Structures are given as C-alpha cells and as structure tokens.
C-alpha cells in the first residue's frame, strides 16, 4: 500500500518491551501501563501502519523522553543553585578546600546540564520535523 510503511519491525521504533526478539503478553501489558499503547486500541501486529501513525508513535515516545530530560534539567538547575548559594556560607567561603570542592561539583553539574540541554534541543527538533 502506497501510504503505509509496510510491516514495521519492533526495533524500528525502539520498543523496549521485547524479550528474545518477541513481544510477549506481559510486554504489551507493560507498554499499556506506561501509556505507550492505547488501552482502547485493537492490537493488530500483522497490519501495516501509515506514515502518520508511525510519526505519532515516534512523537509519543520522544515526547516522553523529552519530559524525562526536562525533569532532569530542572533537578540539575536546582542543585546548581543550591551549591552556588552554599558558596556564600561563611563556613564554606572561609575554607578554600570546601569552596574548591563545591566549585568543582558545580562545574561538573554544568557540563551535565549542557549535555541535557543539547539532548533536549535534538529531541525537540525531531519532534518538530514530524
């Protein structure tokens, strides 16, 4: 069929619910509970899907990944703020070792934050393309 993608293999859409290259009933239940599968939908693994259906699957999965990354970014920003405020504590700024240790941790967290922000940008670009 011209509009469809043909049979989509599980690894084409990154399904994490596979065991020994097979999707089991428990995998489907897990996917339903994680809201990757619509609970009211019919399960028809042998049918082709359209490009629009495939795009929706990709956007749903990436959207969930995007939310996870956003939460991780928020946690990192909070931790960086807390550590930065700690630098103004007299017990810290008067102790060069404590101060350097906290600054080092802030630097490490900023690197991690930059990586998460870049990943977030990549995912948003992919979602916007679909």
Image: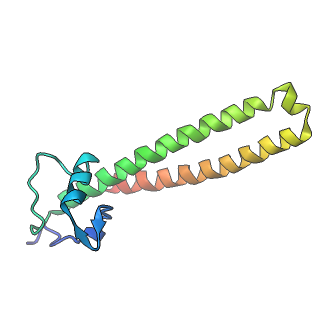
Q: Is residue 5 above or below residue 126?
A: below
Q: Residue at x 47, y 43 (%)?
A: 70
Residue 63 in the image, given as x and y percentages of width and height: 35, 48
> What is the number of callouts on the image?
0
Q: Quadrant of residue 44?
A: bottom left
Q: Outermost residue toward the front?
A: 26
Quadrant placement of the C terminus: bottom left
Camera-nearest residue between 130 and 79: 79
Q: Residue shown at 50%/55% (left/top)?
A: 119
What colour scheme does the image use? rainbow
Tell me residue 80's x, y (percent): 67, 38
Direction from residue 20 to residue 49 in the image, left or right: left
- Locate residue 116, reporting x and y percent: 54, 51
Is residue 78 positioned above or below 56 on the image? Answer: above
Where residue 126 sits, quadrant-wise, is: bottom left
Near-viewer residue (115 or 78): 78
- Residue 46, given in percent of the width and then of the height, sits at 10, 69
User: In front here: 7 or 35?
Assistant: 35
The residue at 67%/47% (across/down) is: 110
User: In the picture provided, is 92 more to the left or to the right than 69?
Assistant: right
Q: Quadrant of the N terminus?
A: bottom left
Query: In this view, which residue lies farthest toward the top?
Result: 90
């Amino acid at each position: 069929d011209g509009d469809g993608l043909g049979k989509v293999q599980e690894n084409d859409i990154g399904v994490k619910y596979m065991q020994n290259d097979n999707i089991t009933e428990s995998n489907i239940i897990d996917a339903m509970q994680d809201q990757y599968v619509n609970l009211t939908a019919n399960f028809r693994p042998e049918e082709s899907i359209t490009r629009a259906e495939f795009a929706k699957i990709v956007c749903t999965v990436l959207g969930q990944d995007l939310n996870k990354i956003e939460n991780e970014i928020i946690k990192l920003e909070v931790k960086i703020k807390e550590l930065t405020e700690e630098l103004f504590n007299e017990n810290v700024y008067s102790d060069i070792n404590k101060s350097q240790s906290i600054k080092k941790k802030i630097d490490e967290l900023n690197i991690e934050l930059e990586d998460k922000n870049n990943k977030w940008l990549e995912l948003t670009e992919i979602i916007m393309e679909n």
